[in-house]
Image: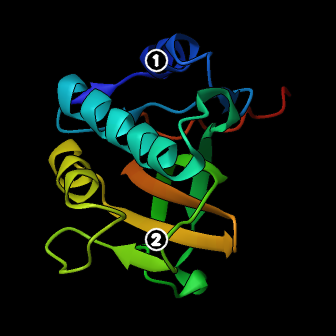
Amino acid sequence: MRLTADELASLLRAHAYLNVQRPPTLWGLETAGLEPFIRHLGELIAAGLSRNGNQLAELVLSVANVVVTPEAGGFIPSGEYVAVSISGAGSWPKDARWEPGGAIRLVSDDVTSAVLAAGARSAYCRWLGPDSGSITTLFPRSDPPVPAPTPAG
């Protein structure tokens, strides 16, 4: 299912009680469905709240357009993605990366099952220090790249 950039923007506006960060131009994304995507987002938020003492306004919900090139050589396959992250203070697990079918658990079993059900292609947790961390999920970009305009003439 395609979640358009406008639909994603609406979801971000609905979460304005968080510190929301996003690029000026959002990309649409591919997900298993709206309900699973919203559940995944809720589980990410719950994971952040359980770590920062339920300080909702202190969590950061960020969305980023990400291009992974073949030269990057990391665990994320090359392609264009929409990254959805929750970060904040608290005791987070050490760095971990996840992909569908993998045995790695992300923060909790609930988060892991929600990320899988939403159709994320990859995810990772980051320990950013003794009192800070994040979890990021990546979904394939749904709308094709817009070709650059050609010069007139």
Residue 71 falls left or right of residue 100: right
Q: Which residue matches tag 2?
A: 78
Q: Nearer the viewer, residue 54 or 45?
A: 54
| Helix, strand or loop under label 1 | helix
Snapshot quadrant of residue 69: bottom right
Q: How is the rendered protein coloured?
A: rainbow
Q: Residue furthest front?
A: 53
The x, y position of residue 86, in whole percent, is 55, 46
Q: Residues within 10 Å of mark 1 (few under 14, many from 20)?
A: few
> Going 18% across and 81% down the picture, which residue do you hit?
103
Which of the marked residues, 2 or 1, is nearer the chain's N terminus?
1
Question: CA–CA distance between discs 2 and 1?
Answer: 27 Å
Could you tell me which quadrant the N terminus lies in?
A: top left
> Going 62% across and 44% down the picture, which residue do you hit?
64
Q: Amino acid at mark 2?
A: Ser
Q: Which residue matches tag 1?
A: 11
Please indicate, yes or no, whether residue 83 appears anywhere in the rendered image.
no
